[in-house]
Amino acid sequence: MADAVAEPAEAPAAVRHAEEVMGTVFSFDVRGGEPRAVRQALEEAVAGLHRADALFSTYREDSEVSRLARGELNLARCAPEMAEVLELAAEAERVSEGWFSTRYRGSLDPTGIVKGWSTERAARSIAAVDGVRGVSVNGGGDVQLLGTPEPHRPWRVGVSDPLRPGGLAAVISAAGVDELSVATSGTAERGAHIVDPRTGRSPVTDLVSVTVVGPRLTWVDCWATAAFAMGSRAGLAWLESLPDVEALLITAGDEVRCTGGLAARLG
């Protein structure tokens, strides 16, 4: 979670909110801006999260994605967000050479990209408000950071240690950049929920978690999922090949593997 210690004499006003949606909790921390305008933008961002849930939830029989999967709708009749998300997911599948997929046990399921996309979209919509200097949106542990929480102090995100409950494996700092996101895939929080697209079953992997760091949560959330399915050796090599991406991989044997530039983001 984001951790910023305020300096009362300089710190901009903070507006915070937590919202239960998509089966998890989204936490907002907004610094700066006129409070009334910020709260209005926050309300609109929260409404957008609930709209995304209504459109993309595979647990809802009446959601557009469920109706699309059953052939009751075609893409042209869906909300414009559907085409946008499926296009992004197709790009993620291309870049990952199929390790990220919108097919889950034979059915259309783009939820692997929806939470990251929704979180990033919510953060950027609030950041567009005049006077806002920093936004952190944490969507169930995956975080989009924009700007800074206060002068001369960056956003910081603690990465949970999957083998030591309550402990931290690392602290990621957004120092020196205007936007940063952190996403983790693994088995510690949700159990074996990731699927190998080639087999439709849980991947045979030596990993317990993959944390990916980059500018946009839409992508790093996908990359963490894909790399986890690949395993530590192939996953690390692939992540090293991606521009503007760093990663921390932890194996079941408590071996830590990192991309070459991750050290610059620690702090």
Image (spheres, rainbow, N blue to C red):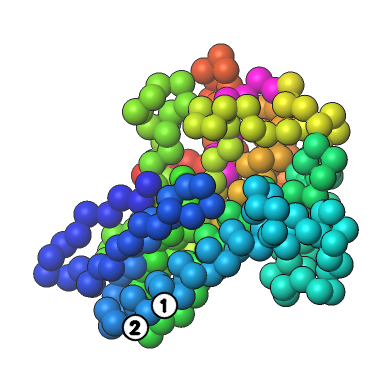
Query: What type is the residue that disc 2 sits on?
Result: Ala
Comparing 161 with 262, the one in front is 161
| Count of numbered tags | 2
The quadrant of the rendering that contains the C terminus is top left
Q: Is residue 148 visible?
A: no
Query: Measuring 85% from the left and 62% from the top, which residue is drawn there?
Result: 72
Category of crowding for the residue at label 2, using alpha-carbon neighbours closer than 10 angstroms: few (below 14), some (14–19), many (at least 20): some
Query: Measuring 49% from the left and 63% from the top, which residue is drawn there?
Result: 179
User: Is 210 included in the stretch rendered in magenta?
Assistant: yes
What is the CA distance from the residue labelled 2 to the residue labelled 1?
A: 6 Å
Label 1 belongs to which residue? 41
Q: Quadrant of residue 70?
A: bottom right
Secondary structure category for the residue under label 2: helix
Secondary structure category for the residue under label 1: helix
Main secondary structure type of the part rendered in magenta = strand
Query: Measuring 48% from the left and 41% from the top, which residue is drawn there?
Result: 263
Q: Magenta segment range?
A: 205-212
Query: Measuring 27% from the left and 54% from the top, which residue is drawn there?
Result: 4
How far from the left and from the top, in percent, is residue 84? Answer: 73, 68
Category of crowding for the residue at label 1, using alpha-carbon neighbours closer than 10 angstroms: few (below 14), some (14–19), many (at least 20): some
Label 2 belongs to which residue? 37
User: Is 263 included in the stretch rendered in magenta?
Assistant: no
Could you say which disc has been placed on residue 78 in the image? none
